[in-house]
Image (cartoon, rainbow, N blue to C red):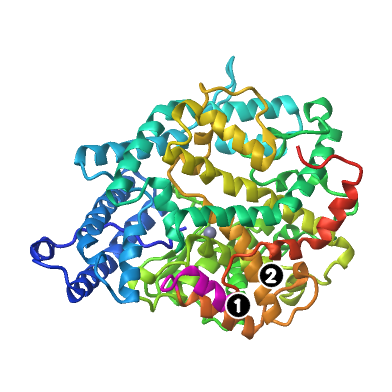
Amino acid sequence: MRHTLLPGIFLPAIALAAFAAAPRATVDGARRFMDNVETTLDKLNVVDNRAQWVRDTYIIDDTEILAAQADEDSIRQTVDFVHQAEPFAALPLPPDLARKFQLLKLSLTIAAPSDPAKAAELTRITSAMEGTYGKGKYCPPGGGKCLDLEGLSRILRTSRNADELKQAWAGWHAIAPPMRQPFQRYVELANEGARELGFADTGAMWRSKYDMPADQFAAETDRLWNQVRPLYLALHAYVRSRLHQIYGDAQPATGPIRADLLGNMWAQQWDSIFPLVAPADADPGYDLTKILEARKTEPKRMVHYAENFFTSLGFAPLPPTFWERSLFVRPRDRDVVCHASAWDVDGKDDLRVKVCLEPTAEDFITIHHELGHNFYQRAYDTQPLMFRDGANDGFHEAIGDTIALSVTPEYLVKIGLLDVAPPPSKDTGLLLRKALEKIAFLPFGLLIDRWRWEVFSGRITPAQYTRAWWDLRLKYQGVVPPVERSEADFDPAAKYHVAANVPYTRYFLADILQFQFHRALSRAAGCTGPLNRCSIYGNQEAGRRLNAMLEMGQSKPWPDALYELTGQREMDATAILDYFAPLKKWLDQQNQGQPVGW
Ligand SMILES: [Zn+2]
């Protein structure tokens, strides 16, 4: 999704000269400099957003080149801005203005070195790695059809043959070794750029985005993880025992779980194996996909259901242009990026989604999630450019998921999609499915950047890349590779976000925050029952609380935004424990007398 400030623009030459020639930096000068940065970027972001939109909805060589060019210019130009800003940032500025300078400096996920040759090399390497990943295929020995990630993932999701799973897993991971050398160079160059900006390394730069010292933030994520770890251990033990029953020797009854048996290439979400591990009476008695199919629900109708959720909370309906300009279905005549995303093209009200909707329960949740981004974008559109983003990057992802947590059976009854809600006795199945998605994800969401932070800091050397990766996967997830690994492999790069330089901690935070938001909004809405049965649909007070946080954008440190919605200034994983409390009790019963942990 696109909700971030898109750096990318050339300050006009005259303005540049004026600032460069300024004899002494003053607070007034700082304000004028920042005003200029914001107006210039504001106008030109629109052009950039349109280039990206056209590329994503009409993929041909030319649109790819134009979009890539915009990205390259962006990075280089933002680095220039940051350097020009240095004399001002040292001044005693008023808090709002100081925050803008800080955010400008932190708006990059990669800082190019000032040496143009090195900057060009870094751009070349990052786009080549993303290309290598995107083109990744596994061709089985002795002929047979080559499979891309989509095909291999389908095997991971659906096959129950341990050898076939192992082969698909190893096949995909074989795309990564060619990225090892480029990755090593990327680390060197990105660190050089980060150091020029005054950060210890790129990992420290990423951690600095969270309004607290980099070390304190790392400790904060550990604290959150330790809150939920007992729940993860219970889920891990239960799933392991079910997999042992199914796969026998291929999955021992004790120790870690084989990473290819969990239904997903990275073992990051396990909901695909729900049918394998579900208790006998898990069927809730309805199937939303079948209901949507039977009613021949049109894609636009699905979007209207989601919009209706937000208007029921008191938000204004989406603008007419949203309906005219969005992409709702996969076009028949051209290639598009179907990965769902939410857009705010002009920073005013040109909101759009780009989704390829099918009448399924999954897409029904997806569109609620995407509109969460759109309503966030609209709520902070009155802020100056530098403040138009989520309170931190975890918040933006969490909003849509918070709303999706309110898509309960009772909500489906209220909007007429379901006649009667299943009785509470069916909650175990519903909760287990959700835990396989959300709880299973937490250690994975944490460890990706644990590995990268250490790589950037040099504590993990290139000679330890793969070993350190598996040490972390064992420590946090309790999983092991299905085949032996060595430093001839480079498994981290078999994950998109590593190959493509996308920080990952935001997904861990979003997974925690969405439950904290859901608990606070449910209580504001007067729901006193079990959290998993609460829906804030139709509640204006919950809408008011939500909007109070959304409209702040990132104008204040995130604890201030968190406080507006939850009354808490700290992230708190106990809401997850509350939500899954009935499941934890059930898991503990199932695990009785069984080993827990690995
Ligand atoms: Zn999203």
Crowd rating for badge 2 (residues with CA inside 10 Å; few <14, some 14–19, many 20+)? many
Q: Secondary structure at mark 2?
A: loop
Residue plotted at (48% across, 40% down): 454
In the rendered view, tell whether residue 347 sits above or below residue 63. below
Q: Amino acid at mark 1?
A: Gly
Q: What kind of secondary structure does the magenta stretch mostly adopt?
A: helix
- Residue toward you, 23 or 573: 23
Among the 4 quarters of the image, the one containing residue 184: top left
Name the disc covering residue 567, or none: 1
Q: Amino acid at mark 2?
A: Ser
Crowd rating for badge 1 (residues with CA inside 10 Å; few <14, some 14–19, many 20+)? few
Location of residue 59 in the rendering, given as x and y in whole percent from the top left corner: 39, 47
- Tag 1–tag 2 contact (CB < 8 Å): no
Q: Secondary structure at mark 1?
A: loop
Residue plotted at (69% across, 70% down): 406
Q: Residue most toward the top? A: 142
- What quarter of the picture does the C terminus occupy? top right
Can residue 299 be seen here? The reply is: no
Mark pair 1, 2: CA separation: 20 Å
In the rendered view, tell whether residue 466 sits above or below residue 6. above
Nearer the observer: mark 1 or 2; the answer is 1
- On the image, numbered disc 2 is attached to which residue? 406
Stretch of the chain drawn in magenta: 553-565
